[in-house]
Amino acid sequence: MSPSPPAARPARSWIEVYYLATPLFALADWLGANVRAVGLAGHPEIRAGYYVICTVAGALVHVRPSWSAGVGLLESSANVLLLVLAVLLPYYDAVASVAAGGGTGALPMTPAFLANFLISGAVWTSVFYRSVRRLQP
């Protein structure tokens, strides 16, 4: 009787692939196509740290696939919050500047910003609804 083959690891989830692809996003960012951390565009050290955290999240999801929903929800929520702040804070500054008699300055809505918002929003929405389905009896 021959020994049974080792159990195959299940296929990688899209969230695992998304986080493990972080070095590719970082490379694209370094080449000028920032679509993953636009809310941190003015803070390169924090953005680099964010990429490290996302890469660690990918490794964590790889080791503990059952944590993928929580990890994805936490990271994408933080990213969406950063994007919202990246929109609101410059608008508040522009209003204060105009009220003080100055100009408005540049506002953050760029195609890269919109792409980042769509990516983060899609991840958050998908992970949120998957988590809700898991919690239902």
Image (spheres, rainbow, N blue to C red):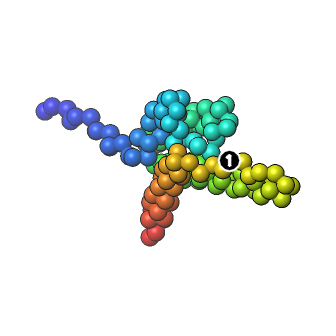
Q: Is residue 56 visible?
A: no
Report whether 119 appears left or right of 48. left
* Residue 129 at x, y percent in the picture: 46, 63
Local crowd at mark 1 within 10 Å, few (<14), some, or many (≥20)? few
State the quadrant of the N terminus.
top left
Residue pictured at 66% horizontal, 53% vertical = 87
Instruction: Establish if 63 lies above or below 66.
Output: above
Amino acid type shown at disc 1: Ala
Total tally of numbered discs in the picture: 1
Residue placed farthest to the left in the image?
A: 1
Q: Quadrant of residue 20?
A: top left
Which SS class for mark 1? loop
Front residue (pair 5, 79): 79
* Residue 113 at x, y percent in the picture: 56, 48
Front residue (pair 99, 125): 99
Residue pictured at 68% horizontal, 36% vertical = 43
Report whether 57 appears left or right of 39. left
Q: Is residue 100 visible?
A: yes
State the quadrant of the C terminus.
bottom left
* Residue 30 at x, y percent in the picture: 53, 29
Q: Which residue is mark 1?
A: 106
Front residue (pair 44, 111): 111
Residue placed farthest to the bottom in the image?
A: 137
Residue pictured at 48% horizontal, 33% vertical = 28
* Residue 95 at x, y percent in the picture: 77, 58
